[in-house]
Image (cartoon, rainbow, N blue to C red):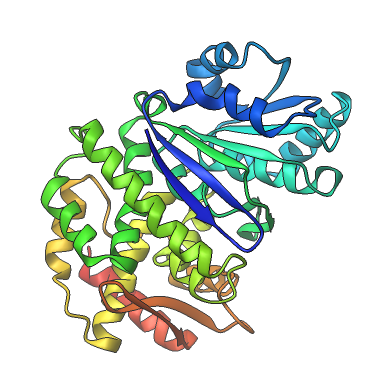
């Protein structure tokens, strides 16, 4: 088991990483909540079908109430959020209750937002079950989606702990492995050139990645995420750099319809576009063609879906949380590990989107 400490202005908490760490959950709850009244577990249909009995067995000493929601981004709607709040009220949760988010990034975002807003905030613990959640489970950003924008309705609410049991990753389909691994790549590009090189040299197939390689990659990714969060908990400065690839990525997700394109696969295209912009604006010394080939070998699409109109993507990007006064700001790289924010005009972006689509057909 590895432990990474996440330090923020509001709270310091542990992230436990490794196969079997879920078995430490009961002792953590007993040690940290002496006045515990209730435990509610929010999970989705897919995770419940695979692992709900396993976590219920771990928590057998407690009376745990389970709220099962739809899988994926369909969990992050107003209706599902309202249903979870109603469940909490019906089960008579109070401020001594604890919420467990057991699932991927969508369940973590939803459960965390429920915890942040129920009775103005109750404790919660993240128990991620996907590679993608190595990013979303750490840092306290919790939210649901609006049809006009992803993660636009949310809060900052740090978990009390994260239990990242790698045994839960065994059942992930390849598309979900790709989705999560895009965020691992992002962490290397924005912070650690040596980590990025390690990824390129060691990860040649997401089908054949070993437990040791996965442990190394996820631990490093969490450490990098923690470093940004510790400097800037509420995203008023450097934490915005964690959105590298997300400005276009979120726009693609929204235009495709949430759930029709995985988050990480959209972000991979967004990162590639941001690298092209970085090459143009800052003459970034980076082998983009080799990067494209590596992404393709790992199974990623490297172009914007043809059915999406650039004008529609532009409007979506204006709703990005980094945009100020409808001016679109991208996270670019001067060098690997040296991110910056750069503002583009609408006209510039439409031209660059056209070039990007032409280059990647």
User: Residue at horizontal 46%, vertical 32%?
Assistant: 129
In the displayed structure, 212 sits above or below 260; it is: above
Q: Which quarter shows the C terminus?
A: bottom left
* Residue 144 placement (x, y as % from top left): 66, 49
The image quarter containing residue 348 is bottom left
Q: Which quarter shows the N terminus?
A: top left
In the displayed structure, 267 sits above or below 317; it is: above
* Residue 114 placement (x, y as % from top left): 73, 42
User: Residue at horizontal 66%, vertical 12%?
Assistant: 61
Side (left or right) of 152 relative to 301: right
Residue 171 visible in image? yes
The image quarter containing residue 175 is top left
**Number of marks present in the image shown:** 0
Residue 312 visible in image? no
* Of residues 39 and 320, the one drawn nearer to the viewer in this rendering: 39
* Of residues 106 and 211, the one drawn nearer to the viewer in this rendering: 211
* Of residues 248 and 130, the one drawn nearer to the viewer in this rendering: 130
In the displayed structure, 80 sits above or below 258; it is: above
The image quarter containing residue 290 is bottom left
User: Residue at horizontal 62%, vertical 60%?
Assistant: 149
* Residue 213 placement (x, y as % from top left): 22, 39
User: Residue at horizontal 37%, vertical 45%?
Assistant: 179
Side (left or right) of 152 relative to 230: right
* Residue 334 placement (x, y as % from top left): 29, 82
């Amino acid at each position: 088991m590895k432990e990474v400490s996440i330090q923020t202005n509001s709270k310091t908490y542990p992230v436990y990483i490794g196969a079997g760490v879920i078995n430490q959950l009961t002792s953590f709850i007993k040690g940290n909540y002496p006045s515990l009244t209730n435990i509610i577990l929010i999970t989705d249909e897919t995770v419940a079908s695979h692992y709900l009995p396993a976590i219920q067995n771990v928590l057998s000493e407690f009376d745990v109430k389970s709220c099962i929601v739809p899988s994926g981004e369909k969990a992050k709607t107003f209706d599902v959020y309202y249903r979870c709040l109603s469940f909490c009220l019906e089960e008579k949760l109070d401020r001594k209750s604890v919420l467990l988010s057991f699932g991927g990034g969508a369940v973590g975002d939803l459960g965390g937002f429920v915890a942040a807003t129920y009775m103005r905030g109750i404790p919660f613990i993240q128990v991620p079950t996907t590679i993608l959640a190595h990013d979303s489970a750490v840092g306290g950003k919790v939210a649901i989606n609006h049809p006009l924008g992803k993660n636009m309705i949310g809060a900052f609410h740090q978990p009390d702990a994260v239990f990242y049991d790698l045994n839960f990753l065994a059942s992930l389909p390849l598309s979900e492995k790709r989705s999560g691994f895009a965020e691992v790549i992002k962490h290397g590009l924005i912070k650690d050139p040596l980590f990025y090189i390690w990824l390129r040299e060691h990860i040649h197939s997401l089908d054949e990645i070993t437990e040791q390689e996965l442990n190394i990659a996820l631990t490093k990714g969490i450490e990098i995420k923690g470093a940004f969060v510790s400097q800037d908990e509420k995203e008023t400065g450097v934490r915005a750099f964690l959105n590298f690839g997300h400005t276009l990525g979120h726009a693609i997700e929204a235009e495709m319809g949430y759930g029709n394109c995985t988050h990480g696969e959209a972000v991979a295209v967004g990162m590639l576009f941001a690298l092209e912009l970085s090459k143009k604006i800052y003459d970034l010394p980076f082998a983009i063609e080799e990067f494209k080939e590596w992404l393709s070998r790992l199974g990623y699409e490297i172009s914007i879906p043809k059915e999406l109109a650039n004008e529609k993507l532009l409007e979506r990007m204006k709703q990005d949380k980094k945009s100020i006064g409808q001016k679109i700001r991208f996270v670019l790289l001067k060098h690997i590990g040296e991110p910056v924010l750069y503002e583009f005009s609408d006209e510039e972006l439409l031209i660059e989107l056209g070039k990007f689509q032409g280059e990647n057909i």
